[in-house]
Image (cartoon, helix red, strand yellow):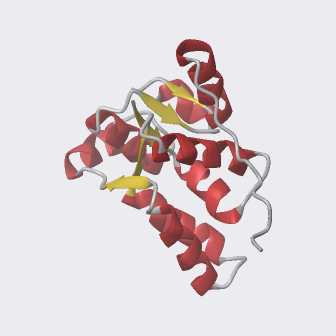
Amino acid sequence: MKLFLDTNALIDLAARREPFASDVKKLCIASYFGDVQLWISTQSYADAYYVLGRSAPKSEVKGALAATLEFFLVVGTFAADLKPALESDWDDVEDYLIAHSARRADAQFFITRDKALAEKCPVPAMTAAEFLHYLEREKGLVYDEVPLPPSR
């Protein structure tokens, strides 16, 4: 199952913003087991770097973002979407480009906490927590982090 993540999911994970980061981590666990593919836009990395770099050292931000590449498949935004974005009734061109990248990537679901974006998205949209509930209800799959004992 192919999921496309919005920028806020990347920022939540990289900045460890709880309670949201825990849900995105669970999506990474699902990806590790091959139950989902996690796709994201290169634009989200640029935006996350800008946002997080205002309040944290740039080297730490780069390291946190680079660590996510272990789980995320990255796709660019599409030049063919730019003119329609500028001609659309969307107030946020970046949201339009990312949402339509999800459509072009054939994502089954778009993961976001942005309610306005979720309403306009051409792909069914929900939060990470809502998707995890969907997986449990529809597929019987539950993911969680398990604390490991310290190594000796």
Foreground: 106 or 120?
A: 106
Residue occupying the point 34% across, 45% down: 86
Point out the image quarter for the C terminus: bottom right
Residue 121, percent across and down? 45, 29
- Compared to 145, does 134 lie above or below? above
Residue 132: quarter of image: top right
- Compared to 73, does 34 lie above or below? above
Residue occupying the point 54% across, 71% down: 49
Residue 106, percent across and down? 29, 32
Residue occupying the point 62% across, 43% down: 26
Furthest residue in direction left, as rendered: 80
Foreground: 36 or 146?
A: 146
Foreground: 118 or 9?
A: 9
- Compared to 46, does 123 lie above or below? above
Residue 4, percent across and down? 43, 40
Residue 93, percent across and down? 43, 48
Furthest residue in direction front, as rendered: 152
Say whether residue 65 is left or right of residue 34: right
Point out the image quarter for the N terminus: top left
